[in-house]
Amino acid sequence: MSMSRRLRLGVNIDHVATIRNARGGTHPDPVRAALLAAAAGADGITAHLREDRRHISDDDIARLSHEIVLPLNLEMAATAEMLAIAVRHRPHAACIVPEKREEVTTEGGLDVRRGADRLAPTVAALQDAGIRVSLFIEPNPEDLDAAKGLGAPVVELHTGAFCEAWGRDSAGEDAQRELRRLQDAAAHAAALGLECHAGHGIGFDTVAPVAAIPTIVELNIGHFLVGEAIFVGFEAAIWRMRALMDRASA
């Protein structure tokens, strides 16, 4: 058996667009950020086209689809409008996320158990278009079972609760409980035959415990990297994250 694995890094560029939109215009350009991410060792680019267009725009998605060589992962709500956009641009993957207009950021995973009937047509339509479907869910076995039932090949575990608990006290009971939840969920995903990704709130201090989970194959990280770029540059932030991931997953 190989002594190490290549853990993929998806870089989310949403908050480059947030800075641009703060005063309008074209700078900073999220497509330029995507190209820099590729040069710095990213394996994919993630962008969330929200219904209110608060950061990434339709034009950003069109340009990303044509100008980057890395796989594009489109985060989207399960709406008719977003489905039409996804089918038009045919990104490599689409991650279905919950979306509430009043939220500052995605607050949790999809309710795949109660929302299965609503999600099923979107999952099927994306797959019919040749788009790899991922479901953003809480690290619970019941949600994983429901995701498997919907026919999605990939799940992304919401790491927000873990990152918050770890940031308060990495040795504390809450942090250790949340880490076990992620470990157990990732193992359960593998047992179900699901490809397991993880993301939300991950930074330099929280990436290693998640990257060390053997059945997680991809991390999606954005806001922290864009924030860190202010101090050290975008490529340097990604290089360091890549190195921490590689060390932990070896």
Image: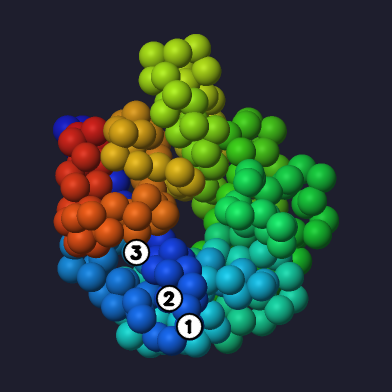
Q: How many marks?
A: 3
Tell me the residue that label 1 is attached to: 24
> Spatial distance from mark 3 to mark 2, Cα to Cα?
22 Å
Q: Which labelled disc corresponds to residue 20?
A: 2
Residue 193 shows in this picture? no
Q: Is residue 123 left or right of residue 241?
A: right
The colour scheme used to paint the residues is rainbow
Q: What residue type is labelled 3?
A: Gly
* Label 1 or label 3, whichever comes before in sequence order: 1
Q: Nearer the viewer, residue 44 or 204?
A: 204
Q: Residues within 10 Å of mark 3 (few under 14, many from 20)?
A: many
Q: What element carries label 1?
A: loop
Q: Where is residue 174 in the image (x, y as percent from the top left)?
A: 52, 18
Q: Which labelled disc corresponds to residue 44?
A: 3
Q: Position of residue 141 (x, y in %)?
A: 63, 31
Q: What residue type is labelled 1?
A: Gly
Q: What element carries label 2?
A: helix
From the image, which quarter does the N terminus lie in? top left
Q: Quadrant of residue 233?
A: bottom left
Q: Nearer the viewer, residue 39 or 155?
A: 39
Q: Which amino acid does label 2 sit on?
A: Arg
Q: Position of residue 200 (x, y in %)?
A: 48, 46
